[in-house]
Each structure stands twice: as structure tokens, then as C-alpha cells.
Amino acid sequence: LLGISFTPREIGDHLVNVYRNGRPIPNSPFKIFVGESELGNAARVRVYGRGLREGMANQNCQFTVDTRDAVVEGLFSAAACLSLRGQHISPESSLSLHALMFLQGFGGLSLSIEGPSKADIECHDNQDGTCLVTYRPTEPGTYIINVKYADENVPGSPFAVNIGGQPSPLVMERITRQREVAEATHVGSQCELSLKIPGVNPRELTAVVTSPSGRTEQCVISEPEPSNYSIRFVPQELGVHTVSIRHRNIHVPGSPFQFTVGPITDGGAHKVRAMGPGLQHGYIYANNEFNIYTREAGAGNLSIAIEGPSKAEIDFEDRKDGSCCVSFRVTEPGEYLCSIRFNDEHVPGSPFRVDIEDTGSNQVYATETKQLSVAAVQDRNLQIGLPMAFTVNYSGVSGRLRAYVVTPSGREEPAVVLPVDVDQNAVRFTPQENGPHLVHVLMDERPIPGSPFRVIVGQDAGDPGLVFASGDGLNRGVVGKYQPIASHPSKHPQKKKKERSPAELYWLSVTETCYHPIASHPSKHPKISP
């Protein structure tokens, strides 16, 4: 059954129209009567806190909203109405709803702030009928805070707040784009995933799709434009598929990706993936690019904000397949903060700290880096305690070469740089951990082409795209009780022992994990009951 909730705004009969595959289901529309006691009452909402009177620029300002006396006494579930009439809606059906409905952020609560600068608003549900509102203005002046409940101002709203302090030296630029629900794919139809992956060799790029049953197949990869790749496959079953994209047997940023065949029923900000070099580092007067994958998140508002020493010019390219490419240009070096939100909620990893470097003071460097190259890089099957080395070749380039290694545990260790010829240096380090290492090579503190270089110490890591998780703990739970989750690295059939590779042995292991929730949160997954 599919539950539908809404906040009523007036007394009387409400009609709920339910459509399946574009047609009304039997007995639709459904009539629901709303009485006076069931309406939200804005006059009974209490708002209090210092953040409604005063605050300081570039500091968090807070206030509390208490709706316990105004919350609607009963929410209506269309599932109950449908079950009384003997109707069952399959989750696989294409279903749309048309009615006088309002999605509930916090019981019909709406907030807005107007003033000299934009101020991001965050609401924290205290799980007791109150919520803590935090906002951060960046400029001093008078701000107007509007607090409404059931589309009506609460007592005292709008509030005039005096914000003191000094203006922020940082500049923020923001764009917002509406993302629509991706067109549903079907068994036997061609599915496509588009990504911009700069700095890779197309011949060393591979993609594999894993179906819900654990079956794996190779994807078709094409490059319609330089650095723009199209990954295509034809599914044979419904459900969530996993697409693993690798370069030189190493997952590209963001991989593995989810791709649902059939209707997408579980969306949200937690399903958005943001990845690319533009979220880590970049250069002034250059297009710093990254990808955002929103297909699995469903419909909603995608907001991208970049704050730093100079204004960012943001370009947005919608690929119309659930993915998009974002690039930005800035004019001053320094640290920038890139915030990516979906329906006002940060996506995983957001906000991203991006280091922007200045190349304007040495314009020759951009040309000289083309003469820098590396050779003899062994990127896998290295061993703990055995030195690893490769050479850096350069011709006519002057500068100081430095290298360091980031280990799997996150430690940063220096690498040894030794001259071996007139225009050649060797970079050498001895690994002490198993797993992927990042070797950074810099000329005059600027990364050379291809840096950082990723190398694997020990056996190749298991493929997360082949791991499956199941159990009631992923869907629902009860506060104070342990919830089990079983992880199945793959559903491949067992093979004879003598034929098993290390990866196949990993497939056969099954683990069970339990977690212990201490508080409930109605807007997060899994659903936890108090």
C-alpha cells in the first residue's frame, strides 16, 4: 500500500485523485472530511531565541520553533482509504497524485530570510514537536525573518533582526536547477550513463554492470566528445543495478553507480553523487569541472553554491539522462567552499573544500608541464616493505620537484626524490600498509600532469559494486533494539575450490551487522520507530 499525507488548509471535504499509468484507479477521487480541530493553527505556534532579535555576521544565529500546540491532530493516509475500498497499488506501477496537497517539511512550517546577504537555513528536528533553526548571514544589516505555519504568519512574524559585525571578505554565487524524475527504463531497453572523466586513457577504461541477482556483464563505452563518455547496457531484469567504471583497474571517482531499471521509488539527497577534480582543486581563469548524478534521487531542486575570495562564474550542462556537468571559473586563488544541496539537504560529501591555485604569475608553467612525464609506474601488486620507484622525465623545465604519499589510513608521508640523469629524477617510497596509495608529485608546489598517481599495495581490493546488503534494518527499526543487516558480497554460484580466485572467495563470504539506534528521525532512511 502507498501512504499519502498532506496538511489541510480549510474545513470541509477534500478530494484525493489517484492515477495509475495516467488513468484514475477505481473509486478515485477519494473524499476526506477535515474538521475544525484537524486544521493547523498558526496562532498556537511559539517562536523564541536570540536569533530573532540580534546576531553577528559570519556566525551561526539560532532560534526555536515550537509547534506542539498547533500540530494537526490527525494525518490522513490514502492507503487506509484505498484498503477500505479493496484497492491495492503496486509499487511497480506508474502512479501520480493530483489533489490539494502540500508536502510537509515540518508540519506545514515555512521559513524565509530577507536581508543584505543570502543566509542558508538549516532546521534540526528535536523529535519533540520543536525544531532548532540555524542561519548564517554574511553581511551586517537588518534582516527580515518570516515564519509561517499552514500558510499563515505565526505570532510576531515577520521578525526584524539586527545583524552586527564586519562584512565578509568572501563572495558567494549560487544557482538552482529543477531536476525532473528520470524516464523509467525497462527490461530489454538500452540504458545509458553519461560522465565527463578528464585525464584518462579510453583504451584503459572498463565498465561492468551487476544486476540485482548478481549477474555481471560488460558495458559498451563510447566517447562522443573528448573526455565525455557514454556507458550503455541492456538490462535483463528489474531493480537496482550497479555500474562499476574503472580506469587501469581502479574505480573512477563516484564509482560504483546505482542505476534503477523500472520506476524509482526511493529518492532523496542521499542518492545524489557529486565527483570530479573540480571538487578538490583547480586553477584561476580555468574551467574547473565536476559531475553530479541525480538520477536515483528523483525530482527536486538542485542547488550549487560556491563561496570564496572571488565571485564564481558557474555553468550548468544538463545531459537529460539524470546526470549533469558543472564548471566554474574564479579570478582569485585560495580556498573555496562548494555546497551542493538537493531539496535543501546537503548531498554526501557536501560542502566540498576546493583549493584554487594561481598560475597567472608563471604563465610559462602551463606550457612547461606538457614536457613533464612519468615512466615505469607499477600501479598494482606492490608489497609491504619493498621499495617502489618510478621516474619523472622533463626537458627544459626548471624548478623544485617534491613528492609525498597519502596512505590508505590517511597519513601523509614524504617520498624520496633523487636525480638519476640530466633531465630525469626518480621518485621512491617504501609502503607500510596494504591498500590504495596516492603518490603526489609537484613541480614548484604545483601537481605535474597525472598527479596524484594511484597505486595498489597487496592484492587488488574487492569491488564494492559486487556487494549486496539486505535485512529489515535497512528499511525500518525500533529505538533501543539492535537491527540486523546481512551483507552478501555477491550472489554468484559457488565454484569448485580449486578454481576459486581471491575475488571468488570473497563472493562466498556473508557477514551480518547490527546497529543500535538511540533516536528516531522520520525524514531519514531507514525508518526508526520511537
Image (tube, grey):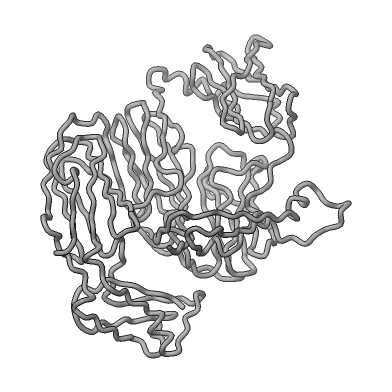
Left or right of 177? Residue 247 is right
Give x and y (percent) for residue 32.
29, 83
Q: Residue furthest front?
A: 480
Give x and y (percent) for residue 348.
45, 47
The part of the image, by quadrant, that contains residue 7 is bottom left
Q: From what the image shows, is residue 89 above or below residue 148?
A: below
The part of the image, by quadrant, that contains residue 69 is bottom left
Q: Quadrant of the C terminus?
A: bottom left
Query: Which residue is painted at 50% across and 79% down in the image?
Result: 90
Query: Which residue is painted at 19% across and 35% down in the image?
Result: 56
Q: From what the image shows, is residue 11 above or below residue 294?
A: below
Left or right of 260? Residue 284 is left
Left or right of 38? Residue 519 is right
Q: Nearer the viewer, residue 528 or 243?
A: 528
Query: Which residue is painted at 53% across and 55% down in the image?
Result: 193
The total of numbered circles placed on residues is: 0
Query: Which residue is painted at 63% across and 69% down in the image?
Result: 237
Give x and y (percent) for residue 214.
68, 61
Tell me if residue 209 can be seen: no
Q: Nearer the viewer, residue 420 or 23?
A: 23
Tell me if residue 339 can be seen: yes
Q: From what the image shows, is residue 287 above or below residue 258?
A: above
Q: Nearer the viewer, residue 432 or 415?
A: 432
Left or right of 449? Residue 382 is right
Give x and y (percent) for residue 433.
68, 30
